[in-house]
Amino acid sequence: MKKLIVNALFAATLAPVAGHAAYPDRPISLVVPYAPGGTADALARVIAQHLGKKLDQTVVVENRSGASGIIGQTYVARAKADGYTLLYDATPLTINPAVNKLNFDPSADLKPLTMVSVTPGILVVPKSSELNSVQDVVEKAKAAPGSLTFASGGTGTLQFMAGELFRQNWKIDMLHVPFKSGGPAIMATVGAQVDMMFPNISSTLPMVKSDQLKVLAITSAKRNELLPDVPTVAESGLPGYEIFEWNGVFVPKDTPQTIADKLEKTIHAVMKEPEVQEKFASLGVQVKTSSQSEFRKFLDAEFAKWADVVSKSNIKK
């Protein structure tokens, strides 16, 4: 009888370990809160394919788009915290709390696993524009306040925030022209319907290479190898100005740490694969990973940064 009790206790102590060791034992959903066909969707599909191979399990990309990513973000925040629902998200996650009324807290309700990439922004003008530098923009804006226009895919998008931060830091007045999405905003800039735009490099590089757009500056802290001769905004006279789009992976907040650690480690391995790095580079995206704690610290700074920009603007929730 005593031997049976000991064996039963031993088996019980092994059960949780065995359960975690078996993860994952069914398909994983990687939720992308944006529409199919965009850069985030394309990158998520590359990661899903390679992550599935390393975990020996299917990873399915599930697009739940709408409301600047809020629909998909809310879905994952409320999902069962078992490691089978992941969120592949980007910069809008940290902007949304500042510009929208949410029914979840992205900082508290999601557990960040790792950053996977960063994409620099650029300041572009129509090819025919008389503006040839950041200083040209600033001088014209000061000489004729409100005369210059900048496009974006909508109020609260990173394109808008980049322009708003630029405006605030230079203490100049520019008119924001919002479009329904980034695509029409880019085409309006190409067609000289607006004076400028602050898109990311991956969405506009083809137009730059085909001589439809002129790049005045890079919005990241360092110059970009795809456009090595283009100065940064900081170099152009605005120290500390840094805007880039990040991508990263999250799980619901109560996901077991053992599962979170396994996913972080496996995603890091995926991002080291040459095929993955080549695909990202072809889209103008730089692979950049982080630990969970590093990612959390970065996100906290981003939440604070965008809240500050919005507090100094005329945006209302």
Image: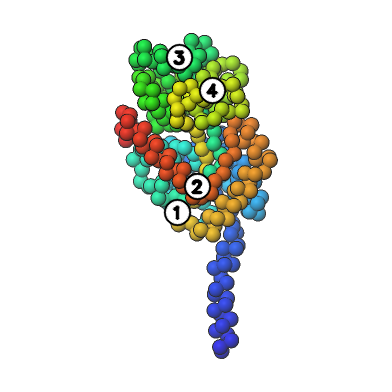
Q: Give the label on residue 136, or none.
A: 3
Location of residue 193 by image quarter: top left
Residue under pointer 4: 231
Label 3 crowding class (10 Å Cα cut-off): few <14, some 14-19, many 20+? few
Q: Nearer the viewer, mark 3 or mark 1?
A: 3
Q: What element carries label 4?
A: loop
User: What residue is drawn where x is 59% and y is 86%?
Assistant: 3
Q: How far apart are marks 3 and 4 (CA)?
A: 14 Å
Indicate the position of residue 293 as horizontal and vertical percent values.
49, 50
Q: Is mark 3 on a helix, strand or loop?
A: helix
Q: Which amino acid does label 1 sit on?
A: Lys
* Count of all numbered marks drawn on residues in the image: 4
Q: How far apart are marks 4 and 1 (CA)?
A: 40 Å
Which numbered disc, 2 or 4, marks the residue that appears first in the sequence? 4
Q: What residue type is labelled 2?
A: Glu
Q: How far apart are marks 2 and 4 (CA)?
A: 28 Å
Residue under pointer 2: 294
Location of residue 177 by image quarter: top left
Q: In which quarter of the image is the C terminus?
A: top left
Q: What residue type is labelled 3?
A: Asp
Question: Relative to 314, is 27 on the left or the right?
Answer: right
Marks 1 and 2 in Cβ contact (< 8 Å): no
User: What residue is drawn where x is 57% and y is 77%?
Assistant: 10
Q: In which quarter of the image is the N terminus?
A: bottom right
Question: Relative to 269, is 105 on the left or the right?
Answer: left
Q: In this view, does 196 lie above or below 33?
A: above
Label 4 crowding class (10 Å Cα cut-off): few <14, some 14-19, many 20+? many
